[in-house]
Image (tube, helix red, strand yellow):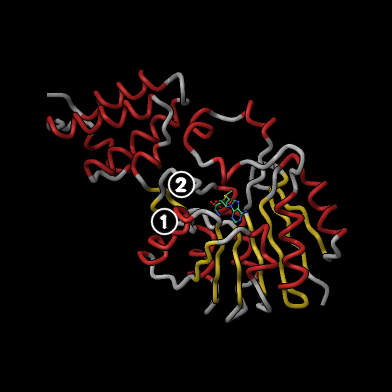
Amino acid sequence: MRILQDFELSFQRELKSIYDNDEIKSIFLLVVEELLGIKRIAYQLNKGDSVSETDSVRFLDILQDLKKSRPIQYILNRADFYGELFEVNESVLIPRQETEELVDLIIKTHTDSSGLKVIDIGTGSGCIPIILSKYLNEAKVTTVDISKEAIHTAQKNAQRLGQPVHFINADILEWDYIFSDQQYDIIVSNPPYITPKEKQQMQQNVLDYEPALALFIEESAPLIFYDVISSFALKHLVPDGDLYFEINQYLGFETKDLIEKKGFQQVQLIKDIHGADRIIHAKKKA
Ligand SMILES: C[S@@+](CC[C@H](N)C(=O)[O-])C[C@H]1O[C@@H](n2cnc3c(N)ncnc32)[C@H](O)[C@@H]1O
């Protein structure tokens, strides 16, 4: 019978062409927690434990999937975001750390407000609207996605995490036909923003498994969502309301310029923890 540490060695050996050592260790510890309920801090104490036949098969099945570059979050159907567990599958983007930074900025900026009306555009797993609903006092949060499957997944996450988010399945590019006179205090979006040219620099696990609909825009119109959503915001934000975007780090100045030309004020370009231009915060005229 094999012991737990044998599987760690197999993971290190078989995955080293795809991930670095730290990533492999982190993935392995997630699998150990999922299969055996052993928390990562307890692994050192338990790594000599023998592993049953059934669990050995499950470890090896997961390893096979990982070798095909399938992200661990899709294999385990879960991802952590802002301290909560979200169900994920191949119809939704795996929530990213940059997006946690966006959400954190919004929560900290509006910590003293209550009853804010918020709309998030591009729901995915529901990570943005669900966390804003949880942490902004009495906020009324709506979210829109073109993908029925994403909305379905996000609805399950909202229900499990007990957050009363309102979902709309629609194409935001057609917003004029969908919204009438609703007004929001905050509009936030992490829209698709990767150009086809950038594909060459991307990891295979993202390209092969994450939904193209969530990632890519056309080379000829890289700022289309920022253009359309800021027009939407001109009509549907209250005076002095806040617009937040996650952006393509290579298009920081162009995106800021576009939003300033639309007439927004105090347009700030904010860097993520890696020093890349990642967030825009702007205010509508008071
Ligand atoms: C970059 S993902 C962001 C998902 C999630 N908010 C997150 O941060 O993990 C963009 C999302 O926008 C949605 N989307 C793409 N085109 C859209 C459109 N025309 N109208 C509404 N949603 C759209 C995609 O389905 C995807 O869920």
Q: Given contact means CB atoms under 8 Å apart, are the residues at marks 1 and 2 in contact?
A: yes
32 or 197, nearer to the observer:
197
- The reply to whether the residue tagged 2 has its Cβ within 8 angstroms of ligand 1 is no
Which residue is painted at 38% across and 31% down in the image? 25
Instruction: Name the spot of residue 165 as percent of width and height, x first.
Output: 48, 70
Q: Is the residue indicated by label 1 positioned so its CB lies within 8 Å of ligand 1?
A: no
Residue type at numbered disc 2: Ser
Q: Which residue was labeled with disc 1? A: 153
Q: Quadrant of the C terminus?
A: bottom right
Q: Reading the chain from its start, which is encountered first: label 1 or label 2?
A: 2
Q: Toward the viewer: 45 or 7?
A: 7
Q: Is residue 86 left or right of residue 265?
A: left
Residue under label 2 = 91
Figure check: 42 above or below 57: below
Left or right of 105: which side holds 34? left
Circle 1: residue type: Thr
Tell me where residue 282 sits by quadrant. Answer: bottom right
